[in-house]
Amino acid sequence: MKTRMAWVGVLAGAIVVASATSVQAGLPAPTPVTDELVKAATAEGKVVFYTSVELVLAENLSKMFQDKYPGISVQVERTGSERVFQRIGQEYAANIHSVDVVNSSDASHFIYWKRNGMLQPFLSPEMAEDYPASSLDPDGAYAPWRLNISAFAYNTTLVKEADAPKSFKDLLDPKWKGNLVKASPSYSGTIMTATYETLTALGWEYFEALAKQDVMQTQSALEPPRKVASGEREVMVDGSEYFVYALIDQGNPLKVVYPAEGVPAITSPAAMLKDAPHPNAAKLFYAFLFSQPVQQVMVDKGGTRSFHKLVKDRPDHVPLAQLKLWPEDANAVEARAEEIKSRYRQLFGG
Amino acid sequence: MASSGARRLELAVPVLALGAVLLAALILIPMGWLGYVSLGGLQGGLTFGNFAALVRNPDMLWPLLLSLGVAFAVAVVCALVASPLAWLVARTDLPWKRAFRLLVMASFVTPPFLGAVAWEILAARNSGLLNEAYRLVLGLPRSDFLFNVYTVTGLVFVLATYTFPYVFILAANGLERIPAELEEASSILGAPRWRTAARVTLPLALPALLAGTLVAFLQAMNNFGAPAILALPAGLQTITTKIWTLFQFPPQPGLAAAAAVPLLAVTVLLLQAQRRLLGRRGYAVIGGKGARLDVVRLGRWKVPAFAFASLVVTVAVIMPYAALILSAFSRRLTITLEPANFTLRNLLFVFTELSGTGSALRNTLMLGVTTATAGTLLTLVIAYIAARGALPLARWLGFLATAPLAIPSIVLGVGLFFAYTHPPFVLYGTLGILFVAFLTIELPIGYQQFQAAFRGLHAELEEAGRILGAGRLRTLRDIVAPLLWSAVISTWCLVFVAAIRELSAAILLFTADTKVLSVLIYDLNETGEPGAIAVVGLTMLLITFAVIGVAYALPRSWLPLQTNTG
């Protein structure tokens, strides 16, 4: 537990720093799920969830919610984090408020939304108690829903374990030319954050060299695991580690590799919108998302990593404490997002 | 008598004028916004900076050149494949002609983005089914492959597969309308068959063939879905995908609007050329259609001809549809025919778990029906005004109704977005904006159907009605509409089919509550959910074929491939 707290501290650092600059109202008092809340939420009948989490997992959670609270349907809008951000921006600019709860794997989005007063601070008693205080936004405007890791993975029927790449440097070996796949920071928040961390550690020179390897370019961070599982490419350069585990569970021949230089870590927060059209259902759903049973299902079925203190990690996960996680810096990502996207596009298209 | 006719005419004028005003508003509002935005309207001042950036910036220039190159290649491929096929189906004793026509029709109504998804399954470099089969049969290592769909060639191939029907339809029409007398005259004068073909048939069919090729060029150049699916993974951008990325965060609408201008210019030029090509034909066709056509006997060429036609429809329709069906029922990401890999999970997921399916289906059907109905009515009125000069500036109305052809849908989508997110018409967030978008985009289809129909319909019949004292509205209702009944039905169906598959504008205009099937498929494809994409795509195709089937079953026979597609 101690090591676990240590990495949470590192990761949460970015969020804390990010919030330190804004006016602090402090954590809101935890709001328990009362019968009145459930009744009011049921009267609203619906909750709209914009998320970047894998679609089948999202729909599974939505079914769990509807089983727990009959009469409230969940509308899942899944797309890449950068698209989530764009859609909300486009809708809010036109004064359309259709989203209740949002999740994005680009933590810098939450800085932006909070700064613009779009988020509704909220804390459930469980969030206050079972999430490391350092991992929470000091104003309770958003909270870490899951931790993503961008790792390598290879197809075990096509690549022998001994031949698999061990480091970012290995990927530049000519033998991988035409056999790699990666996702796009213009679509995926996971990749946006991972690209920032990778280029901070290795510089643009690394990406320039990688771009010469004829890398297949997908949009979503969920797509490289699929392209490797189907055998379209042999190795994924970046992509969602959790989804590799989910695909392994389904019998696909995949294996994760954590690169030697360091591993991109990506906090994927969730938040409730201040102008949520279904404010009570939003509270209920938000509290539900952070509850232990949901977090445990996400880990067991989805392969994600949780910040919840009581959630048990999968036995086949390499423990986070053994990984050399690169530090997150959501502020820097926000400042450099435009530059990263445009320079990345020149190298890889996408 | 004369005075009562005049009074009815006066009544007709406001109705026709209303149609004209509606049309003008539909087109001019978004176009105005486009111009405004491209000239820096949202950047706080008049500037040509966007256009300068377009020329100076290689990031903008290369996609434009790629689009033009791809469109040219697609047009050439389409002409080479579709013209012999059209000739075989229209003028020879090729067996199963009706089946071939139907299959070309199926390719015609298949959205290119769905075709692109299907060809990913078939011809991805390593995991494509065709490449797997090739390696298996020849015992080759993994590094060998026959096709790679994520290339410029792959993009050209897939686009050609779904645009050749434009050439086919126009060429087949052209060939069918050639008066047999001319060919007979040539034969009687002693010309051998090949000479008749080369000196009479081909020159007469050439304008239609070239016109179709130009349409194929434009369709390929302005397509968004196929390059988004096939070119982006290879790190390539066409001008349409580039425009789309310019709307991602941080949006650069001015540059995107400016990037649309070259597309606009090329399209206007080519449409002008097409009009000239088709305009030379100076004979009315309805009534004349009973003329007996000289059926060419293929003789020993029958087998190769049949093989060629079969190959085209197999590649365009049968293989991709089979791939989608396989994918829809496949458990694993690698598609195999083992029973263990069969599953209904994708079907169950789409229809019981995926929360977007229900509303996307409802929205799509609602938009299809309303767009088709409103579009048919509006274009009927416009085509009537333009054809009969019923209002001042009638020719300009005709031009306006075809103007959306000249604007890539994605760019029109941008114009519509600005037009209907700002007062006085705030429609964004409702199905209304999608309705307006689809209506505007499908206007040319409807207008061209009716324009061709009116061209083949002698004005004498209406004049007879007018002489007997009927007003314009009554003439329209009692004489024109019944005569054009098949055009009305075919227009309704064409607009419906085109509307339910529209993606390029919808992708900019939808919100969570107004998602349509095409956007759902695009979303699923970006996420990479192959089984679910196949299920939703097949659902869309089923709806399409159901509508066409109903239209066929209606008393008046409807065969859009045989009737007027001017």
Image (spheres, coloured by chain):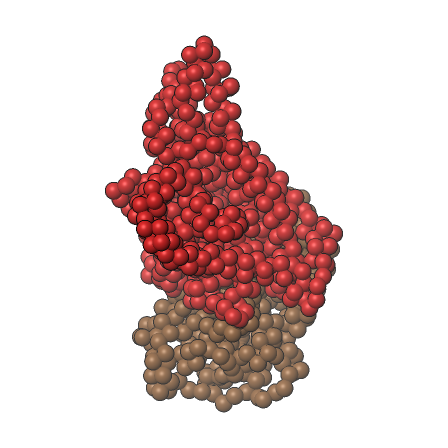
Chain colours: A brown, B red
Question: Can residue A8 be seen?
Answer: no
Q: Is residue B520 left or right of residue A214?
A: left
Question: Measured from the top left, where is residue B26 in percent x and y?
Answer: 49, 58
Give above or below for B61 relative to A316. above
| Residue at the (38%, 47%) spot, across then down | B491
Q: Nearer the viewer, residue A80 or A151?
A: A80
Q: Nearer the viewer, residue B1 or B54?
A: B1
Give the position of the C terminus of chain B as an image quadrant.
Answer: top left
Horizontally, residue B294 falls left or right of residue A232, namely: left
Q: Quadrant of residue A269?
A: bottom right
Seen in the picture, residue B5 relative to B47 is either above or below; the reply is: above
**A193 versus A32 height, above or below:** above
Residue drawn at the location 51% of the way across and 35% of the way down: B278
Q: Is residue A194 left or right of residue A313?
A: right
Q: Give residue B429's position: percent from left, percent from top.
A: 46, 68
Q: Is residue B396 left or right of residue B355?
A: right
Image coordinates of residue B404 in percent, x first then y, are 52, 51
Q: Is residue B160 above or below residue B16?
A: above
**Which is more toward the observer, B204 or A53?**
B204
- State the image coordinates of residue B266 (x, y, percent, origin top left): 61, 44
Q: Examine the image and state in which quarter residue B300 appears.
A: top left
Q: Is residue B43 visible?
A: yes
For image coordinates 57% across by 81% down, the residue present is A117
- In percent of the image, x 63 and y 86: which residue is there? A23
The image shows a total of numbered marks equal to 0
